[in-house]
Amino acid sequence: MLPSWLVRALTPPPAPPPAAHPPPPPLPGTSRRVTAYVQAAVTAECRNVATATATATEGHRHIAVYAAAAALGELHGNGWISAAAITHHLTNAARHHLGVADFDARELTRTIRDGIAAGRDNPRILTDRPVPRPRLAIR
């Protein structure tokens, strides 16, 4: 039999208590809010890619495309947009810069694919907004 001090030293600490409130489930992809959110996200990320690829130095194009693909990949993780749609939109946004400073279609496709995979593993949580309470009119 082991001494009690050794048993205490070898006993792992208790597991942390579960979160008081588990994260809410994501909204269904059919929600008007989700549809608007996804469209706004795609538009913003494509604008970011088009701007960044036009002005970025070598290496920064990769970072800009990867970041946009990862952000949209978070939406793909919830099933709100397909990987094919993300690839299409980001490729279209960066198409004018293919061939500039060795930025080719193969690198672009690989970067988008890797970004989507990274984002997919961390799905974006978008919950329903609470219904505002009516204000009481005080006279």
Image (cartoon, grey):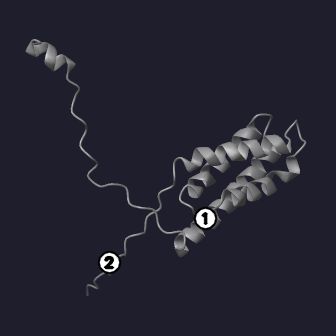
Please rate how many residues cluster around mark 2, counting C-alpha atoms within 10 Å: few if below 14, some from 14 to 19, many from 20.
few
Dividing the picture into quadrants, the one containing residue 80 is bottom right
* Residue found at the very far front of the displayed protein: 1
42 sits left or right of 23 in the view: right
Q: Residue at x 84, y 40 (%)?
A: 103
- Disc nearer the start of the sequence (2/1): 1
Residue holding disc 1 = 38
Query: Can you say which quadrant of the picture contains the C terminus?
Result: bottom left
Dividing the picture into quadrants, the one containing residue 108 is top right
Label 1 amino acid? Answer: Val
84 sits left or right of 118 in the view: right
Disc number placed over residue 133 in the picture, else none: 2
Q: Is residue 65 visible?
A: no
Residue 11 placed where, x, y %? 19, 23
24 or 42: which is nearer to us?
24
Give the CA separation, mark 2 to mark 1: 27 Å
Residue 58 placed where, x, y %? 80, 34
SS class, disc 1? helix
SS class, disc 2? loop
Label 2 amino acid? Answer: Arg
Q: Residue at x 82, y 42 (%)?
A: 106
